[in-house]
Each structure stands twice: as C-alpha cells, then as structure tokens.
Amino acid sequence: MKRLWARIALSFFILILILVVILWFFLTAIMKDAYTDMTRDHLVENAQMVSQLIETADTHNDPEALQGMIRHFNQPIEMRFTVVDEEGVVLADSENDPATMNNHINRPEIQDVIRNGTALGESVRFSTTQQFNMMYVALPLVEQGETVGAIRTSLSLQVVDEALSRLWASLSILLGLMFLVSGIASAMLSRSITRPIDNIMDTTYRLREKDYSSRVNVSAKGEFGDLALSINALAASLQKQMKEIEENEHQLTSIISNMVSGVMLVNEEGRVVLLNSAMERFLSQHKDNIIGQSYEKVGERFALTPHIQAVLENSQKVHEEVHSYFPQERIMDAHLAPYYGQGWQQKGAIVVLHDITNIRRLEKMRSDFVANVSHELKTPVTSVSGFSETLLSGEVTDEATTRQFLQIIYDESQRLDRLISDLLHLSKIEKQEMPLDLEIMDMTALVHEVAKTLHNSVEKRKTRLTLPEASKEIYLQGDQDRIRQIILNLVGNAINYTAEGGRVDISLKENINTVRLIVKDNGIGIPEESLPRIFERFYRVDKARARHSGGTGLGLAIVKHLIESHHGEIEIESREGEGTTITVILPKNQEAD
C-alpha cells in the first residue's frame, strides 16, 4: 500500500502537470494568435503601401511598368506581392512571371475583395507555386472611386512556424523546470505534512499491538501537535489502566490458582472457559483437555450436568453434595450460581467444589471413636458394676469367690486406667503438647534394654527373640523415652500375636541419613484388607484376643504419632498366617521446628 506522503505528492504532481499542460496550450495558443496577427498586420501595411505607390505612379494600366515596380520589392522584403485586375488576371508578381500564372479570380482573398466588395481579404493555404503554407492578404485597388483590381501580399508561414517552434521549445523547457521544481517542492511539503501523521499512525499501530509504552515523538505545532499530545495522554491513560487490569488479573489468577476449592466457569454456550488447578486435580485432567469442552462431558465425574443445566436455563443457585468414586472416592460440597455481564445479562454459570472428603471421614472417625470408646469403657464398667453389685448384695459368702470377684474388679479398673491414660497420652501427642527431649542415643543399647523389660513375656510365651549385635553401636538423635515406647509397643505386639514357641527378630540397619528398626515375627499375621486400618484407634484384627491380652487398641496409633513427631516413617508387610514385618525409618538428626 502506498504511503500517505506518496499519495499526496502524486496528487500534487498530477495537479501541477494538468496546470502546466493547460498553461502550455494556453500560452502557445496566445503566442500563435499573436504571431498570426502580427503577420497579418505586416501584410496589410505593406499592401497599403504598395497600393498607394501604384496609385501615385499610375502604373495600373501599364503592366510592364507595374511588373518592374513590383519586382523591386522581391529582395529587400521577404514578402510576395501580386497585382490582379478585376477579372483575376495577374498583372504583376514580385516572384514569378505573370504570364505563366493562372487566373486568381477563384482565390478566396481575391473573391472577398473583387466580388464581395470587402475591404480586406484574407486566406491561409498551401501554395502550389511556392510549395508551402502561405498567408494571403488582399486589398482593393481603387481608381477614381472604383475597384479596378486587387493588391495581394503573402508571406510564408514557415518562418512563423519556425519561430513558434523555437518559442514552444523554450516554453516547454521553462514549464518543465517549473514542473520539476514544483514536484520536488510538493514532495517535500507532503513529506513534512505526513511525517507527524506517520509517527502518529505508527504509535497507534503499536498501541493496537498492546505496546502501551509507545509515544508520539513529534515537535509539530498547531493541530498536529495537539493531536500528538492527545494521543500521548490517551496512551499514558491506557497504559495505566492496562497495568491496573493486569495487576487485578494477576491477583485474581493467583487467588483462584491457590484456592483449595475447585472453580470452573461455563459460558452461555455451555462450554468450559476457565478452571483452576484444584478443579484440574478433582477432575483428574489437564485444563488443556477441558477448556472448550461441553459441560455435559466435564460434569459426568461428579454428576454435575443437571445442576449446571438448571443454572443456565433457570438462573437459579444450586447447593448440593456430590460424590465421585473414580479414581478415588471424593465427597464434594458443590455451589453453583449464574454469573452476569453488563446490564445483568447472564453470561454462564460458576461451579465451586469444596472437597469435604476428609471432613466426612473425620466425622465418621469421630463417630467411630465415640462408639469405640463407649464400647471399650462399657465392658470394664459393666464388669465392675456387676461384680460390685453382686458383692454388695451379700449373696456371695465364699471367700474364694469373693476374692475372685474383687480380682476381676481390680483388673477391669486397671484396664480402665490404661485406656484413659493412653487416650490422654495420644491426645497430648496429637496436640504437640509433649515436645521432644532430644539427645544422642545408642539404638542398639536401647533395643537390648527394652528386651530385658519384656523378658518375662518372652519366657512365658517361650518366644525366640533375636536381637542386633550389642557391639555394633548405632547412634541417632531423638527423644529416648518416646523411642523406647515405640520399640516396646512394637516388640510387645509381636510377642503377643505370635504363638508360643514363635520367633521375633529385631534388627537395625544404618544408612547415611537414616536408621531402620525392623521387627519381624512369624505370628498370626494381618489380613490384607486390615492393613490400611491397622493404625486407626481401637482397630483390632483379632478383637477377642486383643481384649484378652489387656490391650487398649491405641498402641499402634500412639506409635505412628511418635514416629511422625520424629519426622520418620513406618512400613508394614504381613501375610495372614505367615507373620508380620514392621519397619521404622528414623532420621539420624532432627531438624529444629
């Protein structure tokens, strides 16, 4: 596309060219007419002069004398003189022999003078005698008041044409120079006019391409200067507004991206146009696979399709609890509402999902915990209440029976005490009300110390207990009392759930940054379906045996919390009827919290 200055310059060029051509034709026409008039006047003056001479010399009736006189005008004056009578017969001619010349009565200029009686005859034509264009002027010869003939003067137009050609050439050069100078001036003028316009157009183009830092750099005055200032002010205002919009957009994006709740936006056409990372996680798909999809396809996961349809069609708010079972079970608190554009025109629907799976799980755990605690407390309380009531009724008189009942009451009260103590202990650990008393300890020595504590149980159940080599010292940083409790609980469980004559192996493995405590037995094992719940409170694999052993069902829950307080991990492998292997991974050094 041509630039603006080129179009303006071309318009000036065409206008100047038209004006120059018109001026050229106008001047040439004027000059040609001027030369023609001058030539005519010159011919008329000479014709009048010769006519007066003829009248004065009275040579009209003497052809020889007349031819002699006319002959004298041939050299000094480059003009042809011809004298004819009233019949058109040539009487004298300054250039040719009159006897050889044709009758001139049919010549236009002769006819005008002789036959038409005009005072002046004029004609321009090609002369067969002279072989070029000639201008003829004829005047009547008057004798005693009567026209007796005509005196004709003629001049070759070749001289006039040559003079006009030279004049036209000079005029063409002059007008050409004028056209060239005017063209250059118009180009410079158009360039000076369009330069600030080009700058302004370039700035507006860059603004359209979102380069809001661009400004018009012109020093023009007047309207262009005012326009440049207005555009610069507009660009500055636009840049400020775009920065505010981008900042708000970044804030909104950051808020939405970091929300734990899933957010999804569906437009009025039913297509997903926005969602955050939480919603991607809930739908188990990347947003590139979701954006632009129909809400019917996306809403299948949580059965959201009818709810979104209700919002789009009826503009109503929806609050429902929805479920998903793949790839894992999730319970969502769904809030759906219409969103509006300008003029409160509905533009689509907003879907917000809150993951309440853990809340519902905690509520169930709380309910189960209350039920378990109630169940665990009910058994000893019932035993204590029943046997106490029996003793108080006085129906038991046998001392041995009385002692047996009192022993049962004592054992159940001890069990109640252990249960309450474990509950309080677990509560303190979860609330982090028992800070770690860190020290460097020898794990090998600690394992041997716990083994001595459990010596009676080992002897009673005839368990073969294998310990790590006492000479191999393995050190780590931790709370010795809590780690002792971990080892005591795990080894005690291994002994209790292993048949008499069974085997329990305790080993330690040291890595660069961690120490592994491995407790392995060949006891009854744990069913595969029970492994995920083994660390839950009050969960027992063999409930009858666990209660008979005096356990509270909180030991492994306490162990797990104590390990986590040391930033460690616990792993369990078991096969029912083959045994269980529990691995505790503890870091050698505890980072300060």
Image (cartoon, rainbow, N blue to C red):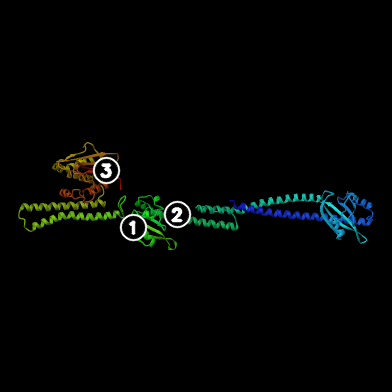
Q: Nearer the viewer, mark 2 or mark 1?
A: 1
Q: Measuring from the top left, give residue 530's x and y in whole percent.
A: 23, 48
Instruction: Check disc 1 and report the residue beneath it.
Output: 334
- In the rendered structure, which disc, 3 or 2, sits on the residue that comes first in sequence? 2
Amino acid beneath label 1: Ala
Instruction: Tell me what residue is drawn at x 31 percent, y 51 percent.
Output: 326
Residue at 49% x, 55% y is 239
Q: Which three-letter amino acid code belongs to the residue tagged 3?
A: Ile
Observer able to see residue 446: no
Task: Say which residue label 2 marks.
Answer: 246
Residue 585 numbered mark, or none: 3
Q: Which badge, 2 or 1, comes first in the chain's sequence?
A: 2
Residue 51 percent location from the top left of the image: 90, 56
- Spatial CA span between label 2 and label 1: 30 Å
Query: Is disc 1 placed on a helix, strand or loop?
Result: strand
In the image shown, does 547 or 7 lie closer to the viewer? 7
CA separation, marks 3 and 2?
48 Å
Q: From the viewer's perspective, is the residue at label 3 or at label 1 nearer?
A: 1
Amino acid at the residue labelled 2: Glu
**Circle 2: element type:** helix
Q: State the separation of the CA atoms marked 3 and 1.
A: 40 Å
For mark 1, does the 10 Å Cα neighbourhood hold few (<14), some (14 to 19), or many (20 or more) residues? many
Is disc 3 surrounded by few (<14), some (14 to 19) or many (20+) residues within 10 Å?
A: many
Asked whether the beta carbons under mark 3 and mark 1 sit within 8 Å of each other, the answer is: no
Q: Quadrant of residue 517?
A: top left
Q: Position of residue 475 (x, y in %)?
A: 25, 40
